[in-house]
Amino acid sequence: MGDTIEIITPKYHLGSAGEIFEDTKSNVERCDVVFAHLPKAINERRASYGTIFEISYGYALKKRIMIISDDEFVHKHPVMNHLAEMFYGLDAAIADLTTIH
């Protein structure tokens, strides 16, 4: 990882299903760390199927996966615990970026 952080902004709903998939796939390939927000509340911030794909694909590519969630179910889920580092807040996850993994 370099000394700077670049935020890769997904292009959701811009193009065909194939274009959205390729953009999502490319973003995961380009990144060093996959941050995923999996909130407990059911609202527009609720994780999408695309978020689950990003986590899984990032894991397959041996990327560092960091999940931020206020949902105890997510923190206790055996699959999520196997493939990701778990955090209750974004500040804690960002602070952990300076650690070597």
Image: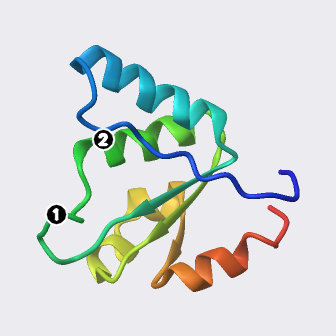
* Residue at the image point whose x is 54% and y is 60% from the top: 84
Residue visible at 34% across and 18% down? 19
- Could you tell me which quadrant the C terminus lies in? bottom right
Looking at the image, residue 54 sits to the left or right of residue 40; the answer is: right
The reply, left or right, for residue 48 in relation to residue 65 is left
Q: Are marks 1 and 2 in contact (CB under 8 Å)?
A: no
Image spot of residue 68 (x, y percent): 45, 72
Say which amino acid is labelled 2.
Gly
Label 1 Cα crowd, 10 Å radius (few <14 / some 14-19 / many 20+): few
Q: Quadrant of residue 96?
A: bottom right
Disc 2 target residue:
50
Q: Residue at x 48, y 84 (%)?
A: 89
In this rendering, the answer to whether 98 lies above or below 13 is below
Q: Residues within 10 Å of mark 2 (few under 14, many from 20)?
A: some
Residue 55: percent from left, percent from top: 45, 47
| Residue on which disc 1 sits | 44
Identify the amino acid type marked 1: Glu
Residue reaching furthest to the front: 14
Q: Secondary structure at mark 1?
A: loop
